[in-house]
Amino acid sequence: MAATTKKPLKLPKVEIFTDGACSGNPGPGGWGVLLRMGETERELYGGETLTTNNRMELMAAIQALEAMKRPVEAVLTTDSQYVRNGVMTWMKGWKARGWVTADRKPVKNVDLWQRLDAATVPHKIRWEWTRGHAGHAENERVDELARKGLREFGRGLAPAEAS
């Protein structure tokens, strides 16, 4: 019997840009996402009435990954060192210790970190950081979307897909 080798599945490539915003910390907050696959773009935004900037940064990444209908190869760009360092450096240790920090304190925002962890599973993701408010066009756009989510959610509207 001849041996067969499976060709690795070629995953669709997606560029993801995320941002969070908060008015007060805690206070009302919003998140924004730009998804780009080739020439196709999709924008998402939403918010919460009482939250923190870090929670909105996490929600942006979560919403972006949960919006994927199938596994993808993504480059996710964020201006949040908290999100990038959490995923790239801290999360492995937190999980190994049962979601506590190195000094045995509960991980802040553990509900969202666990949700983000689960959302990454089907995908191949490269996490990149960009400086916020430094003229990066896509980062500026998701900042606008996050602020839109903050404003609209403050009026009682639900998270939305931008038109």
Image: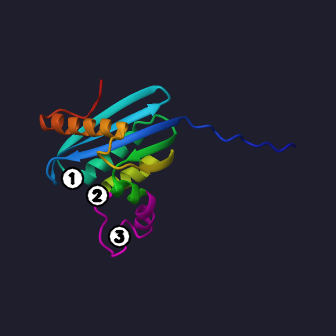
Q: Which residue is mark 1?
A: 52
The residue indicated by pointer 2 is: 109
Q: Residue furthest bottom?
A: 103
Residue at point 31% right, 55% down?
111
What is the span of residues highlighted in magenta in the rendered image? 88-110
Corner quadrant of residue 94: bottom left
Q: Disc 1 versus disc 2: distance between alpha carbons?
A: 10 Å
Q: Position of residue 76 (x, y in %)?
A: 43, 45
The furthest residue to the left: 155
Q: 7 or 74, which lies in front? A: 74
Please provide percent x and percent y for residue 101. 35, 70
Q: Pointers 2 and 3 in contact (CB under 8 A)?
A: no
According to the picture, the residue beneath numbered tag 3 turns out to be 101
The answer to whether mark 3 and mark 1 are in CB contact below 8 A is no
Amino acid type, label 2: Asn
Measure how far apart labels 3 and 1 are at the Cα level: 20 Å
